[in-house]
Image (spheres, helix red, strand yellow):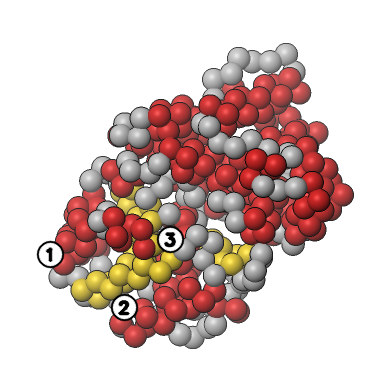
Amino acid sequence: MSSFAFQTVPHLVVEPGLARRLGELLRERHAGRRAVLVTDGFLHRSGVLQPALDSLAAHGWQTLVIDDVVADPPEAVVEAAAQRARAFAADLVIGFGGGSSMDVAKLVAVLCQDEQALSAMYGVNQVRVARLPLIQVPTTAGTGSEVTPISIVTTGATTKSGVVAPQLYADAAYLDAELTVGLPAAATAATGIDAMVHAIEAYTSKRLKNPLSDHLAVLALRLLSANLLTACRDGANLQARSDMLLGAMLAGQAFANAPVGGVHALAYPVGGIFHVPHGLSNALVLPAVLRFNAQAAAPLYAELGQAVGLPASADADSGAAAFIAFLEDLIRQAQLPQGLRAVGIGQEDLPALARSAMQQQRLLMNNPLPIDEVQALAIYQAAY
């Protein structure tokens, strides 16, 4: 067996309704009295937070809610949140929401030390400080951010940068499927496809793929593919919601160790330039990237096809083609837009997307095949 390393969040709790006893769970494992809860304005206004806030108060936590997080959070939002948390003298940070809220919470937890600037943290293993205790509570089944050491920040009008460091692994992730019940069908579909892409790209990653990440990716893909349409069509189905949330977390564990590649690299410019939600951006380019990658990854795609229940094919190429067709059909049945033109992107925009994708070398280096600017343009054209 080849050598490998594997790391993940040390404490996981999966329990519908656990948000109603969040304060009790934190008190069992953490000292202190001052908690910062990082979320978005919609969740705060909707009342979804209230049971958790009530539980925190009942168990002696004084809580500052920072609800300024927006999708694709810019640096200014991160830095303002950290400043407020420092002024509050926080003892603990809670990320409560989707991937953006959890990503900001990670950075708030390290920036509270006020010993290193955010600008110095971008890249891999550039964080030089410890962090405050960090808890993650996801409200979508998609990003897997609750178990990854990655935070994505919008650093310009159309550009994003990542902070990747072991300090960003949380102390605990609490998975409460009841928090995902109200997610609209379109968001359920997009975040679910995002989670599936995490599993697929972890399983086919050129770097750091290992037996544990493979096992997690396969289990995640089975759960996600089997439950996505039910969760979209019957949002109150708690079993489907639970399986989606678990699948997204397992996929997060997989790609935290065997990193994602070309799908994410080509999806980021679609989101950054045209403000398309991240999960939908992945869905738009997924089939075209996989068809390109099948030149090298067909045997792995065929294995994933069998993992989701497709019959065995005569050869790897036909198995890979069947798996890609299965994903296209799933995206169509989930009623997500198909093709870049469906989100207002023009043919004339594709060269700019290809140029922007070349900035994602951190991701492209993990892809089964190298992708240069000419090939990226061809993939975008195939996805158009």
For the point 42% across and 75% down, the residue is 81
Q: Nearer the viewer, residue 315 or 176?
A: 176
Mark 1 is surrounded, within 10 Å at the Cα level, by few (under 14), some (14 to 19) or many (20 or more) other residues, namely some
Alpha carbon of mark 1 to alpha carbon of mark 2: how far?
Answer: 18 Å
* The C terminus - image quarter: top right
Q: Which amino acid, by three-letter code, is at mark 2? A: Ala
Q: Secondary structure at mark 1?
A: helix
Residue 52 appears at what percent x and percent y? 22, 58
Q: Name the amino acid type tagged 1.
A: Ala
Residue 340 in view, yes or no: yes
Q: Which residue is mark 1?
A: 58
- Left or right of residue 19, residue 134 in this image: right
The image quadrant of residue 23 is bottom left
Q: How many marks?
A: 3
- Whole-angstrom CA distance, mark 1 to mark 3, is 24 Å
Q: What residue is disc 2 on?
A: 90
